[in-house]
Amino acid sequence: MTRIKYGRSGASLDRRFRSRTYYARSVSSPAPETIVVVVVVVVVVVVVVVVVVVVVEVPVVVVVVVVVVVIVVVVLGCKLRCWHVLVI
């Protein structure tokens, strides 16, 4: 394989492409643990909403508003990395 030198560092072009490909692949695919956590959270939220609406007979609008507020707070917590604030 022919190595093409570039820049003052003299690093080879194929090495640069290999590292970029690896970086892109690691960023684009989420970790399996993240997928599992998201699925578990969605299932728990659906079960809680059904139980609250059927058993407690709370209006659906109230439950939807509470769920949306909780999701927004959790997403902001993820973005700001302030998990110590979100003690559930």
Image (cartoon, grey):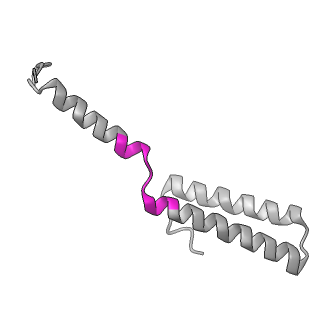
Question: In the image, 77: left or right of 59?
Answer: left
Residue 33 placed where, x, y %?
Answer: 45, 63
Residue at 78% across, 70% down: 49
User: Which quadrant would residue 32 be assigned to in this image?
Assistant: bottom left
Residue 3 visible at all? yes
Question: In the image, 15: left or right of 23?
Answer: left
Question: In the image, 59: left or right of 76?
Answer: right
Whether residue 63 appears in magenta in the rendering, the answer is no
Residue farthest to the front?
1
Whether residue 29 appears in magenta in the rendering, the answer is yes
Magenta: main secondary structure equals helix
**Does residue 49 sit above or below 6 in this rendering?**
below
Residue 66 placed where, x, y %?
Answer: 77, 64
Residue 74 placed where, x, y %?
Answer: 60, 60
Count of all numbered marks drawn on residues in the image = 0
Residue farthest to the bottom?
55
Quarter placement of the C terminus: bottom right
Quarter placement of the N terminus: top left
Residue at 65% across, 64% down: 42
Residue at 8% across, 23% down: 10
Q: Is 73 or 85 nearer to us in this picture?
A: 73
User: Which quadrant would residue 77 be assigned to in this image?
Assistant: bottom right
User: Which quadrant would residue 75 be assigned to in this image?
Assistant: bottom right
**Does residue 24 sit above or below 60 in this rendering?**
above
State the extent of the magenta-drawn residues as a range: 25-35
Q: Is 39 or 74 nearer to us in this picture?
A: 39
Q: Is 70 or 41 nearer to us in this picture?
A: 41
Residue 82 visible at all? no
